[in-house]
Amino acid sequence: MSADSGGMGQMPGSGSPLLEVKGLSTHFFTEDGEVRAVRDVSFQLYPGETLGIVGESGCGKSVTALSILRLVQRPGKVVSGQILFHGRDLLELSREEMRRVRGRDIAMIFQDPLSALNPVLRIGYQVDEAMHAHDKVPRNQVAARSVHLLDTVRVPDASRRVRDYPHQFSGGMRQRAMIAMGLANRPELLIADEPTTALDVTVQAQILDLLREMNRETGTSIILITHNLGVVAGLCSRVIVMYAGEIVEEGPIEQIFENPQHPYTWALLRSIPRIDFARHDRLRSIEGLPPDLIALPRGCKFHPRCPFRVERCLTDEPSLQTVKGGQRAACWVTMKRAYEEMGAADIIDTRPGAASGVHPPGFTLPPFGAADGGGPTGPSEVAAP
Amino acid sequence: MSIATEVAQEFDAGVVAREQVSLWRDGWQRLRRNRLALAATIFLAFLALVCVVTFFWTPYPPSVFVGNPYAGPSLAHPFGLDEYGRDMLSRMMVGAQISMAVGLGCAVIAVVVGVSLGLLAGYLRGWVDSVISTAINIFYSFPTILMALILYIVIGPSIINIMVAISLTVWMDMARLVRGQTLSIREREYVEAARASGARTGRIMLGHVLPNSLGPIIVQATYIIPSAILTEAFLSFLGVGIPPPTPDWGNILGTDGLPAIRFAPHILLPTAILLSVTLLAFNFLGDGLRDAFDPRQKR
């Protein structure tokens, strides 16, 4: 793909944003109540930038992505906000206008390439289809470009393999075929929703290499959605951490990894198994479960699991505040204070309120280690790099 | 490219060398193992051949006097002659042509109507689904024969009209089936992926949803054929089907065979048996196809 190597990975902040999400809220109107899956999410993405969105299952990452493409299905609905793509609000477009954006300007690849490929259609047909839906690639060049694309994403013997069915491809090759479909119309933005989760570790690395290469060579911006911090570290220049449908922290990747300011980010990073930790150390999980999105707690949504909570966290909701150049966190305490005042560096007991001693009325924390034996509750879904 | 990548690619390439078996070949191989279905297929192939031959040749003209009325089977007329001295074998052959034509024609109409409405209802949901589902329920609430009878009388006798009349009584099963299939397939990730790639709604319905429900549609169509043949025979039996002197299985049974059942059973019996065996063959074939397309039956 040499013809379209226009933008080299530009630095964030240069020029006007490619995508600007403002106050996006997406709710699901179920029989049990209104599930407020995404609330007041705002972020920007610049041309050529790679942005990671991380968080546990059910924290609203995928719904955010689907909202951008307006693919949220009933009973879900984008209830407020703006999604400006090149300054044009996607939420205002007609259905046909939106269809022309999908796959052409913004493409998406999915978690499980086996279920995202139609089992009864040939790979080539499915790559062709992405181009036939738009007139960006001349009709008589579609078949040749399919082979070329599969070749580019390193499907071996592409000219023969276009005639294969998905079940004849291995997992890694299926995901490469998905990426080929995503890149078919040279989109400006590629949204990759857990693109490596269904793959084994060696293949994960290849897929990430491929995405990095595509970003560098074609200048395609990438939003990478994952629960795997290692994957984000390998590809993204900036990262957004989501918790319970909100952005709790965002910033440049190095800053977030080296100096997380939100206790949730801090806990996520601590839960990664590290080769330089003593072997007898128990893997540190985050105690408790994410809140019910129908009945959200008052105040900070993380306070029921936060060891550093203060009185204010129980009642007032924090908003994103700049903590350091380009890094913002939604926290009344922030890790800076937790380190200085609560001894966060040496903390072992990470149960809610353990470090600060702040609890809701009528709640007492049993002594640490008293009822230890059941192991950690509510394992957080954060995998190793 | 790292060594790991190269090794992985070699591995990728190696996995593929497995034998390619397409859905259709796989289905055919499994159908062949089912003896009843195989016998049914052979019988129906023979019947189809007879129908083709009938276009060019019958032993005698089917609607012309060629010997003694009510004459029994003989070498010249293996199935005897009817009350007007017409050759029964020739009449059964032409009858087969008409019955098969009606059966297949109805299946085609029911498939086109049922599949389109089922796809629309299942994929678009909302008010479209409400309208189509209500229509299905209304059509179900009519007695089949009575409705075919009324329709046929209203739109007048001809082979096309009888097909339309019968089709209107059998499309609902197909529509319901396809609607159900569509409702489940539309939630699959590959449909979402197709939407995300900007594919048009019609393209998704015809290119993704339809091919994935082809198996059940074919099975259902196989069941429509015998029920259409039976309905047509019954209408003709009642004297409101294909107008005489053109023979079809229904009027051979009703107009020619039944009055003579006591003294010339050779008019009714062979046609009745042929009709039953044909219906049975279609049903066996349908069962065989259903099992062949059902992945859970895989051995």
Image (spheres, helix red, strand yellow):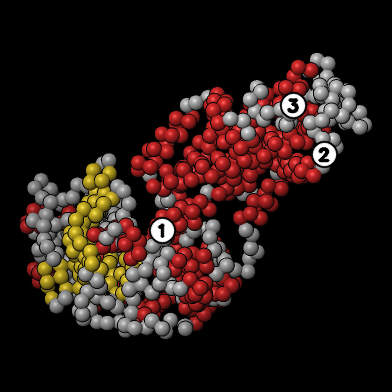
Q: What residue is pinned by disc 3?
A: B252
Whether marks 3 and 2 lie on the same chain: yes
Local crowd at mark 3 within 10 Å, few (<14), some, or many (≥20)? many
Q: Is residue A333 left or right of residue B185?
A: left
Q: Marks 3 and 2, Cα distance to the nearest angstrom? A: 17 Å
Disc on the earlier residue, 1 or 3:
1
Q: Nearer the viewer, residue A282 or A306?
A: A306
Q: Is residue A45 visible?
A: no
Question: Could you tell me which residue is drawn at 48 percent across and 67 percent down?
Answer: A128
Disc on the earlier residue, 3 or 2:
2
Disc 3 is placed on an element classified as helix
Local crowd at mark 2 within 10 Å, few (<14), some, or many (≥20)? some
Question: Could you tell me which residue is drawn at 71 percent across and 47 percent down?
Answer: B33
Across and down, in percent, residue A70 comes to 30, 58
Across and down, in percent, residue B275 comes to 72, 31
Q: Return the chain for callout 1.
A: B
Across and down, in percent, residue A292 comes to 23, 49
Across and down, in percent, residue B247 comes to 74, 31
Q: Is residue B242 left or right of residue B169?
A: right
Disc 1 is placed on an element classified as loop
| Disc assigned to residue B58 | 2
Disc 2 is placed on an element classified as loop
Q: Nearer the viewer, mark 2 or mark 1?
A: 2
Q: Is residue A142 left or right of residue A296?
A: right
Disc 3 residue type (three-letter) = Ile
Q: What residue is pinned by disc 1?
A: B200
Question: Could you tell me which residue is drawn at 37 percent across and 83 percent down?
Answer: A5
Question: Could you tell me which residue is drawn at 49 percent across and 58 percent down?
Answer: A118
Residue A352 to residue B222: above or below: below
Q: Marks 1 and 3, Cα distance to the nearest angstrom? A: 51 Å
Q: Nearer the viewer, mark 1 or mark 3?
A: 3
